Amino acid sequence: MSEFPPLADDVRTNRISRATTAAGPVKSADRTIDVLELLAGAPRRLTLSEIHRELGVPKSSLHNLLQTLVSRSWLETDERNSTYAIGLRALRAGASYLDRDPVIEAAGPLLSQMRNELNETVHLARLDGSDIVYLASRESAHHLRSSSRIGRRLPAHATALGKALLAVRSDEEVATLLPKDLERLTPDTVTDLETLIGELNQARRDGYSFEQAQNTPGLGCFAVAVPGRQPAIDALSCSVPLVRLIDEHRPQIVSALVHAAEELGHIARRQAR
């Protein structure tokens, strides 16, 4: 029996099986990607038995695959080869993605400018399936502030960033994109599709999205989709602790987000050509 508690449900649901979505997959490549995605989403190191249980790969084949990935530094293991985690080579691949994307590169100065203007934490994120992935961030200088590590994934329906990107899609597209059961991250997370559509309609009217404590208790967040791609896949956000969020601050936040998104949109348009 494993010494670890069972994996959280989101580790399972965030892993996409290439075997059922790709045409004519190569089994070994398929398994390799599944292993990397599983370990990238796991909150801790996993044992061979846990990986076997999650993926259903025969233990003998799985052991050889894990050792190959360890030898190539895509995975790391302990001295007893009993647990596994993502390795340094995976970091290199992720860094290459960040370094070579012109939108991410252009967002850096804009995020710094917004952070300096608002003194609140600001983010750039991208829609990936039914999740958003954080690509860049600048933290507030306040002692009480939010933070999100680069590469972190969150359900789109529970974030202002995700709502901003869902709002530029039709209700039918949203219903198709999202899972049937919407995950609850906090007591305030909207998990009813009809209620979510109502929030998206409000975001369409306002030109920005806002959520309050739906993914982090005590935190409010504003977001604006970056124009330029049809539909938009990137969004900018500003997160503010609710104890510091006063009515006079809201127009300043929205204005800064809209201005930065428009500037960044010019980059996205050039990339899409």
Image (cartoon, rainbow, N blue to C red):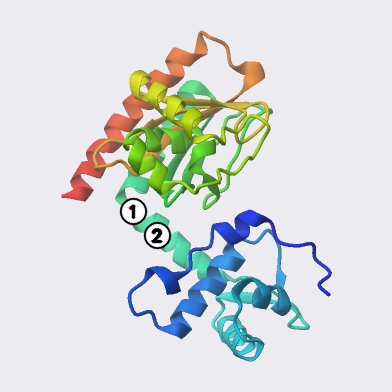
Q: Is residue 153 above or below residue 146?
A: below
Q: Is residue 51 above or below residue 180?
A: below
- Asked if residue 52 is positioned above or below residue 38 in the image, the reply reads below
Left or right for 205, reference 130: left
Quadrant in the rendering for residue 64: bottom right
Q: Secondary structure at mark 2?
A: helix
Q: Residues within 10 Å of mark 2 (few under 14, many from 20)?
A: few
- 175 above or below 12? above
Callout 2–callout 1 Cβ contact below 8 Å: yes
At horizontal 54% and vertical 82% (from top left) the residue drawn is: 72
Residue at (35%, 34%) from the top-left corner? 225
Q: Is residue 91 left or right of residue 216?
A: left
Picture coordinates of residue 35, whole percent (x, y): 56, 73
Counting the numbered discs, the total is 2
Q: Which quadrant holds residue 261?
A: top left
Residue projecting furthest to the top: 248
- Residue 223 position, x and y percent, is 44, 30
Q: Mark 1, residues whose alpha carbon is within 10 Å: few (<14), some, or many (≥20)?
A: few
Q: Amino acid at mark 1?
A: Asp
For marks 2 and 1, give the CA distance. 6 Å
Residue under the image location 48 percent in, 37 percent down: 123
Which disc, if any, is residue 97? 2
Q: Name the residue that disc number 1 marks.
A: 101
Q: Is residue 194 left or right of residue 24?
A: right
Give the image location of residue 259, x and y in percent. Answer: 32, 25
Residue depicted at x 75% and y 80%: 82
* Label at residue 177: none
Give the x, y percent position of residue 141.
60, 29
